[in-house]
Amino acid sequence: MAKSPEVKLAVFGRAGVGKSALVVRLLTRRFIWEYDPTLESTYRHQANIDDEVVTMEILDTAGQEDVQQKESHMRWGDGFVIVYDITDRGSFEEVAPLRSLLEEVKKPKNVPLVLVGNKSDLEHVRQVGTEEGERLAAEMACAFYECSACANEGGTVAEAFHELCREVRRR
Ligand code: GDP
Ligand code: MG
């Protein structure tokens, strides 16, 4: 039997945007309100994607790393989820610099990436418009998802990770 493919995914974004909540949602289909914000963990997760079992190794970064640590996480990963919080404009402004660092570390390779705007359940305190996220993703030539780790309507969280796996496997 052919060995099932393995992809290494790293999740980046400012502390507090919901990286851990998204990863826990993907793994358990549950939402856990409080997660140690300084915790950095890796998880293994299997999913059936387009009739193929894919094993994801997922690095949930803390979001407070210095540049050296970020670079080493970037060298480790095959694909990247960059998360911002739609209620925190500052977190959105951190996306482009992260992308630049990724390009720098991975060059000349093209970096498989998805952009996620999290906390879409908090519409009433939104600071970043959906169109702004779409525009940024278009500039970065990557897929874009708005989602909520706590509501997860339509299974968007898994969809984002699965699309990233496809993107990695296409390269
Ligand atoms: P991390 O630092 O990026 O790993 O962020 P966490 O996963 O620890 O989440 C930070 C805070 O945001 C916690 O209080 C979570 O409960 C909350 N949170 C995470 N995702 C969502 C979401 O989709 N909606 C709402 N309302 N809160 C969220
Ligand atoms: Mg975390």
Image (cartoon, helix red, strand yellow):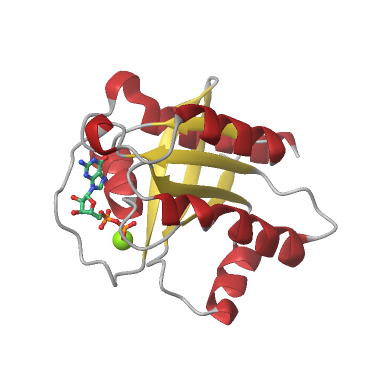
Q: Where is residue 95? Give x, y as percent.
A: 55, 53
Locate residue 35: give its quadrant: bottom left
Nearest to the observer: residue 59 or residue 53: 59
Q: Quadrant of ligand 2?
A: bottom left
Query: Picture coordinates of residue 37 (x, y %)?
Result: 26, 67
Q: Looking at the image, which is closer to me, 41 or 88?
A: 88
Task: Determine whether, in the image, residue 108 is placed left or right of residue 149.
Answer: right
Q: x, y percentage for residue 5?
A: 59, 41
Q: Nearer the viewer, residue 165 or 116?
A: 116
Figure check: 22 above or below 98: above
Indicate the quadrant where residue 98 lies: bottom right
Q: Position of residue 65 (x, y in %)?
A: 46, 76
Locate the C terminus by quadrant.
Answer: top right
Asked if 4 appears above or below 84 in the picture, the reply is: above
Q: Is residue 21 left or right of residue 33?
A: right
Q: Residue furthest right?
A: 108
Question: Where, quadrant-wise, is the N terminus in this rendering?
Answer: top right
Residue drawn 60% across and 74% down?
72
Decide if residue 13 is in sight here: yes
**In the rendered view, would you say 119 is above or below 110?**
above
As rendered, which of 171 and 15 lies closer to the eye?
15
Q: How many marks?
A: 0
Residue 121 appearing in the image: no
101 vs 30, left or right, is right
Look at 48% across and 43% down and name the residue there. Answer: 55
Residue drawn at (70%, 38%), measured in percent from left and top? 139
